Amino acid sequence: MALDTIQRGSATGNGAEVDASGRALVRLPDAATPANVGAVRAFAENDDGTLSGAAYLKSGEVSPDYRNRAGIDSVLFNDVFNATAQNTGAWRYVFNTLTASQPGAGTLNFGTVQGTTSAHGAFMHTKQYFPLVNTAPLCVEAFFGQFTAAMISGEVFLCGLGLPSAATTIPTDGVWIKVTSAGVYGVISFNGTPVEDALDAALPLSALTVGTIFKLLIIVGERDVEFWFDDQFLGEMAIPVANGLPFLQGSAPLFMMKYNTGAVSNTNTMRVSRVGVTLMDVATGRPWGQQQAIMGLSAYQGQNGHTQGTTALLPNATGATTVTGAALAQATALATGLGGQAGITATVPGVDGWVTAYLNPASTINITGRNLVITGIHISSVNIGAAVATTPTTVQWSIAFGGSQLNSLATAESGSFVTATAKAARRVGVGLQSWIIGAAIGAQAQELDQDFSQAPIVVAPGEYLGAVAKFIQGTATGSQVIWALVTFRGYYE
C-alpha cells in the first residue's frame, strides 16, 4: 500500500485530510457533546535527565472545585558564613580533634585541624528545628564543595536534616546526603535504621571538582525524598513502606558534619558557603517580623559578625550590688546596649541625655549589613536613693535614632551634597513619667509602652539607636536616682 494512501474510517467511510506538507488536518470534537471530547494528560518536565539519564516529569493537580492548585513557599531559615566567628545564637558546634572554622572568606570549613582516627570529627547544627507539615515538602539547600584535596577512604561528609549526638555519631533520625571516596549517597534514617541509595552513578565523587562550590537540594516529601545537584535531578528515594513519615522525630535541625571512620592522613577540607530551609507549597501567613525572629534574627541577640550574646545591657549580678546612678549626657550613654538598665541621678530640668545607646554594626565584608527594625519600646522606672523632696519629679522620654555618631543629639544635619554627609538623630516621643512630692524610695512611675509595628523605626547599619531622657521638673539632688529599665522590640532584616 502506498504511504500516501488516504485511510477511511470503517464507520463513516470518510477519509482523513492532509495539508500541502502532508500533515494531518485535525479538528477537536464539538464541546457540546462531552462524551466525544478527547483528553490530554499534561506533565511538566522538571528535569531533562542530564544526570539521571531520564527526563523527570510531574503532573499538576486540580482541586475538587476544578481549579489548578498552586503553592507559595515559606522561608524558614537562611544563613551565610561570611563572618570570622561562629554565630552562637543560631548554631551549635561539637568537635573532637577535627575542627571547623570560619576564616572570613565566605565559607564554613570542616577540617581546619585534620582528624587522623575514627574518634575524630566535628558537626554544626542549627538551634532552630524544622517540622514536617502534612503533605508540604521540606526543602534543604546547601552550597558545598571539596577544598585543597579530594576525600580519601575513611573520610565522610554529611549534610541535611538530623541531630548528631557526638562528634562522630551520626543522627538516628533524618534525611541527608553522604559523601565519601566511594561516591555520593542519599540517606533516610528512621529511628536508628538508615537506608542508603547510591547516587554515585549520577554523581561520582570525581564530579565534585576540588575548589568548586556546588548547590545541593534535598526535598523531603510525604512519600519520597528528591536529591538535586546544581538544579539537575540526581534521583529520589521512596520512604520505606513500613514508615509513616520520612523520620520518626517529626522535626529536625539542619546540620553539616565531617568525621573519620578509620585512620586517615589527608589535607581535605569540606566547605559550606550558604544554607537554607524552605517549607514548600504552604504560605504560613506568619508576620515578617515573627519569621525573622524565628530564624534567629531577633533584635535581642547579635548577628553574623556582631558581638555575640544579648544586645541589651542587662549584666548578670552574682552577689549583692550597690545600685547607683549617673548624670545624663549628650555624647555618652549611661547604658551601652539595645536597651537595658541604668540609674539616672536627678539633675536640673531641660537637658536631654542618652540613657541607652546602641550602634547597629556597619556593614563590612565579614559583617552582613542588616536593617534594625524597631516595632516597639517599653520603659519602666522606679525612684531609689532618696524620696522626692521639695519639687515633683517628671521625666520626658524619647527615642533618638539614625544618627551617624553618638554625639548626634548635638550634631546638626549637614547641608545638601556636603562631602561625608552627617546625619542628625531623628526623634520620636515616648511619654512622661512623674513622681509627686514625698514619693518614697521604691515608688514606681506609670509604665510607658509604644507600638510601632504599623510604622516601624528603621535603623540602618552604622547608625545609632537609643532611649533619651530629660527632666522636665525636679530638684538636682544627687542622692535621688531614677532606676530605668528600657526594652526595645524588633528584628533584623
Image (cartoon, rainbow, N blue to C red):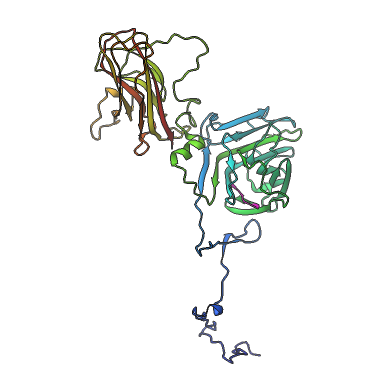
Q: In the rendered image, which quarter is residue 88 located in?
A: top right
Look at 69% across and 35% down and name the residue there: 259
Closest to the observer, 489 or 187: 489
- Which residue is at the front of the view, 110 or 92? 92
> Can the viewer see residue 268 in this picture?
no
* Residue furthest out toward the bottom: 13
Magenta stretch encompasses residue 321 = no
Position of residue 351 relative to residue 2, above or below, is above
How many numbered discs?
0
- Residue 83: x %, y % from top left: 51, 32
Residue 217 drawn in magenta: yes
Task: In the rendered view, tell whether residue 23 sits above or below residue 255.
Answer: below
Q: In the shown orientation, is residue 151 left or right of residue 475?
A: right
**Displayed quadrant of residue 58:** bottom right
In the image: residue 228, left or right of residue 340: right
Residue 13 against residue 72 in the figure, above or below: below
- Residue 223: x %, y % from top left: 65, 53
Please tell me which residue lies in front, 144 or 492. 492
The secondary structure that most of the magenta stretch takes on is strand
Residue name at image x 36 percent, y 27 percent: 465
Q: Is residue 73 left or right of residue 255?
A: left
- Quarter of the image containing the N terminus? bottom right
Which quadrant holds the C terminus? top left
Q: Is residue 450 visible?
A: yes
Q: Residue 265, position in %: x, y?
A: 72, 33
Residue reaching furthest to the right: 262
Q: Which residues are magenta?
A: 216-224
Viewer-nearest residue: 43 or 415: 43
Residue ID at (56%, 71%):
40
- Point out residue 124 in the picture as x, y percentages from the top left corner: 61, 33
